[in-house]
Image: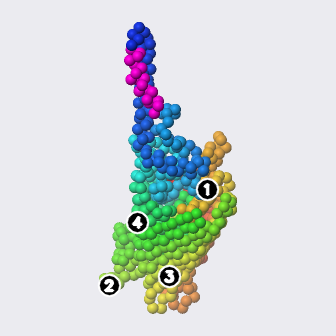
Amino acid sequence: MSSLAFASFLMGGAAPVAMASSSDDAQIRALRLEMAQMRKEMMGQITTLKSRLARTESVSHKQDHMSTASAHGGRAHREIASGPVDPSVQFNEPAPFANRIHLANAGTPTSDRGDVMSWKSFRAATKSDENVHVGGMIVGFPKGRFTVASEDGAYGLSIGLAFHEDFGGFFNSGPRGNEARGAFNSFTSNMRRLRIPFTFRYKNFVAAVTPDFGANHNDGYVGLYEGNLNYTGLHNTILTVGYFQPRVTEEDSESSNDFFTLERPSITDMVRNIAAGDARFSVGGLHYEKRWWIAGYFTGQEWGHRNASDMSSTYYGGGSGSTVDSQTGATLRVAGRPVATKNWDVHMGASGISAFRLACNSTDAYHCSRSTSFGQRPEFDIGEANLAATGGISNAAQVWAAGPELGVRWKRLIVKGEYYHVGVQRDAPGLKSAGFQGWYGSAAYTLFGNPRLYNEKEGAFGAPGVPEAQEFDPARNHWGALEVVGHYSVIDLNSRLNDANAKNVVRGGQQTVWTGGLNWYPNRHFRIMLDYSHFIVSRSMQATNIYGRTGNSVAARIQAGF
């Protein structure tokens, strides 16, 4: 302000004095040029001052958190303001340090869904990376996602991307005898996911809308991944209503951008689709702390489940245009983290899920059919056929599943696994309940780059991280991050094979999959995956698996996430 006062004094007082010396025209011309230059500089400083004065609430927030930023060694916040800036001019505000959130998954891939966070966290995130201030708005990439927000963060719009293109094929996987060949391509491709998450914010109210142009299992199907409203005003809590992916099982709580291998283990994919899965109507919430995590949801139908034009090819399959009473269910997941140190993380948890009233599909004016079925591909989703599948299970009154989860991280190594039992209660005379089970074990070791760490908000392990200084740049001997992964998965879809009543016998087959792979992250936004799998499936009642079947697959994925 002293500079502005001095400039005003020169313009108001120095000019008359100079003009009084009429004997020296050269000095007058020089003084006038100097005055014009000073006026130009002063106008630039006024423009900057107006912009900074408009940020009253943002400046107050910086002052409140200055000590936190200093304690964490935050780097200087890089800002581009409108108008020229003279560093010698001070406006009685603290140096703008970045209040970076030190989450366990910092530098890892962005989420494949709307990133719902509290207003407080959103304001901090918008200040952690380079941004541009334009007309009272902030434009930047907090957590790697394009965002436009008001200066105080009350209004915000974020647009992201989850791009997964898979290609590969099967070999030595042909049919036996007179089995149907099935869709086991020697080489093909599939746009596995093409999601564009839109996140709209007003303070602690957030709407997430994510269309998916890679829905279902084949190219060309467009669907809705999520469309929900959220409230984030409670500490470390997200309350949600709408079409959503309820968090159940450790694998399902992870973003698909963080998976060890291309697909989830068969048992977790099977369990989540009982009453959760993507695009499921949900009402509930989650809460997390450093040492524990809990989430529960009441759930209904999947998006598009009653659309007659879709019939059996809804977003995730199994829909019916004759549904007269939609499904209802619930999910619950609890997890603890008893050990959390620099070198060790121990994760323990349990998940339960139930469809306590299955969808009723009308068969005539007075009766309806409630049934269910289970089937899984050999963990490579390019449109291939199911080998392990139960077929329809009639008179299904209720379906449920429950089981534990365990994970351990030691430095760069992570080992984790889950087990689930699945039950089907039947309500017709002479029919007994059916039971199925499955489990998996996975391991990942980060060869170079930042290792996988624990994500408190998801209650699960994130992907390896690639700090900006370590991004792929051969000229500087920087190679990003590389990890090697291994995976063993089993599902048993056989039930009561020796029962005297044939209606109680379910021969879905037992499927075992061994997978090994490499994941390379040149930076936080891109990943290349390569998986080799060997599968063994005992005989089932599927036309593609009358005698049992084995085979192999090689698959790759190119991934982009913003």
Label 2 residue SS: loop
Q: In the image, which is nearer the foreground, mark 2 or mark 3?
A: 3
Residue highlighted by disc 3: 424
Mark 3: few/some/many CA within 10 Å (<14, 14-19, 20+):
many
Label 1 residue SS: loop
- Cα separation, mark 2 vs mark 4, equals 31 Å
| Res. 366 mark | 2
Mark 4: few/some/many CA within 10 Å (<14, 14-19, 20+):
many
- Cα separation, mark 1 vs mark 2, equals 56 Å
Q: Is residue 4 magenta?
A: yes
Residue 88 visible within the image? yes
Q: Main secondary structure of the magenta part?
A: helix
Q: In the image, which is nearer the foreground, mark 2 or mark 4?
A: 4
Q: Which image quadrant is residue 229 in?
A: bottom left
Among the two numbered marks 2 and 3 on one chain, the one whose residue lies closer to the N terminus: 2
Mark 2: few/some/many CA within 10 Å (<14, 14-19, 20+):
few
Q: Name the amino acid, label 4.
A: Gly
Q: Residue at x 60, y 50 (%)?
A: 71
- Cα separation, mark 3 vs mark 1, equals 39 Å
Residue 151, image x, y percentages: 43, 47
Q: Which image quadrant is residue 206 in?
A: bottom left
Residue 168, image x, y percentages: 56, 59
Residue 145 visible within the image? no
Residue 519, image x, y percentages: 61, 56
Give the magenta range: 1-19
Residue found farthest to the top:
23
Among the two numbered marks 3 and 1 on one chain, the one whose residue lies closer to the N terminus: 3
Residue highlighted by disc 4: 242
Q: Residue at x 38, y 17 (%)?
A: 16
